[in-house]
Amino acid sequence: MRWTAIYSTTSAASCPAPRALSAGEGSGIIRPDMDVAHCRVALDGRFLQQPTTGSGQYSLHLWQALAATADEPTTVLVRPDLPMPVDPQLGGGAAGTTDTIRVPIPPWVRHDKAEKLWWEQRGLLRGARQAGARLLHVPYFAGPRFTRLPLVITVHDVIPFIFPEYGGGRLMRLYLRLVSAVARRADAIITDSDCSRRDITAWLGIPSERIHVIPLAVDPAIRPSDDPETASALRARYGLPGPVIFNVGGLDARKNVPVLIEAFAQALPDLPPETRLVIAGRAHSGNQRLYPPLEPVIRRLGVEERVVLTGSITDEEKVALYNLADLYVFPSLYEGFGLSPLEAMACGTPVIAANRSSLPEVVGQGGLLVDPTPERLAAAMVSVMRDERLRRSLARRALEQAETFSWQRTAEQTRAVYRSVLASATPAPA
């Protein structure tokens, strides 16, 4: 048997009896006579057991925050062949327990892609029906095409539409058509930024009033740390004798990392002695259009001794490098949210980011926003690295900006979307 995951509150006693939805029904004003807090909500937790992915991080932290603020226990569905990143009995709400619902995947579903499709179109509805759910939330760009349950979907971005190289082959294009149709019929869409809301409207044709912007937050473990022993070990491991400029957040083409290397090479004569550029991460495929190789750029610019490519790093190493760095630079051309610069700011690290897509929303006044060109990035790096007063100011502003984001606030705003949808349309069984 294979299992996946569902979140659900447990008491539906005060939720009105189910009825079928008419086409297009979904959002509206909360009725004061409806106790929607007791309506059961199912949260697809398929990514809870893939916590290193973006959807996994979102699912995990949202689930934890919902569980911690719930008045009732939660129900979570897991697969026995994959470890849970947290104790499934994690306390939450008054009862402090987490129930488990298990939905077996049929033995004839063998291929990973078929398993994913079966879960989204059939298994999730079976789990929601077993839970007695009154609303279904799929926390990534997917969901069942046909269901009478009110449906909330989180669409973090529409990158495969904006950048065709991310769209994959024919099967992926067909899948994108399917999930786009699902999103259009959803009662509410949650997304991470105003930028993503505009792009969802532009590319999927979903009215902006059905799209709710709820920002993400960082893992509470990502915070300022003064650990000389860890810092010394990192310096020895990667050969970092002096100041450090750090970048992490992906090496795919839209991350603009080759331009960062060019900017660093331009800035190098004016940077403090022994400054190193540390780039963490690895390419996830051999597609050079999607993951342009960095080594040829480094050799062409003659900065082999100054640019450090760490490869994959652990979460603990990432946090340690944020704290070790004198500056974090993120020149990405497009982000649905931009979690990496927010993580850097949460550590009190000065940040330079591109003035593109959602990054001005995330960085705000907490960092420097510049055109992501070699010349502008180089000038900004020199300004920050040679001005200690500016670095201290940016570090303070970074912490202040990061504190405006929290998973508790994300969970509260997500619950408000649930209540709004439930108040306007009480569902029939899935």
Image: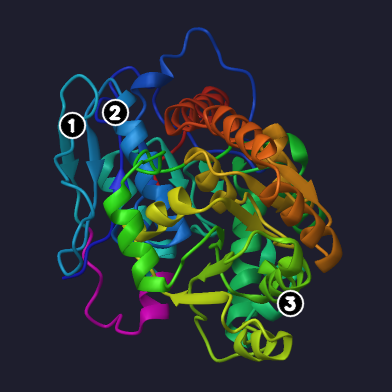
- In the shown orientation, is residue 18 left or right of residue 371? left
Which residue in the structure is indicated by mark 1? 91
Q: Nearer the viewer, residue 219 or 184?
A: 219
Which residue in the structure is indicated by mark 2? 68
The structure residue drawn at horizontal position 50% and vertical position 28%, both measured from the top left corner, is 422
Name the image quarter holding the N terminus: bottom left
Q: Quadrant of residue 279?
A: bottom right
Q: CA distance from mark 1 to mark 3?
A: 43 Å
Which residue in the structure is indicated by mark 3? 164
Q: Is residue 314 above or below residue 304?
A: above
Sequence-first tag of 3 and 2: 2
Position in image of residue 359 (x %, y %): 70, 47
Q: Of helix, strand and loop, which one carries label 2?
A: helix
Sequence-first tag of 1 and 3: 1
Q: Amino acid at mark 2?
A: Ala
Q: How is the image coloured?
A: rainbow
The structure residue drawn at horizontal position 35% and vertical position 47%, both measured from the top left corner, is 60
Would you call the spot at circle 3 few (<14 residues within 10 Å), some (14-19), or many (20 or more)? Answer: few
Q: Amino acid at mark 1?
A: Gly
- In the shown orientation, is residue 81 left or right of residue 66? left
- In the shown orientation, is residue 295 left or right of residue 325? right
Range drawn in magenta: 103-117
Q: Amino acid at mark 3?
A: Pro
Position in image of residue 6 (x %, y %): 31, 48
Q: Of helix, strand and loop, which one carries label 3?
A: helix
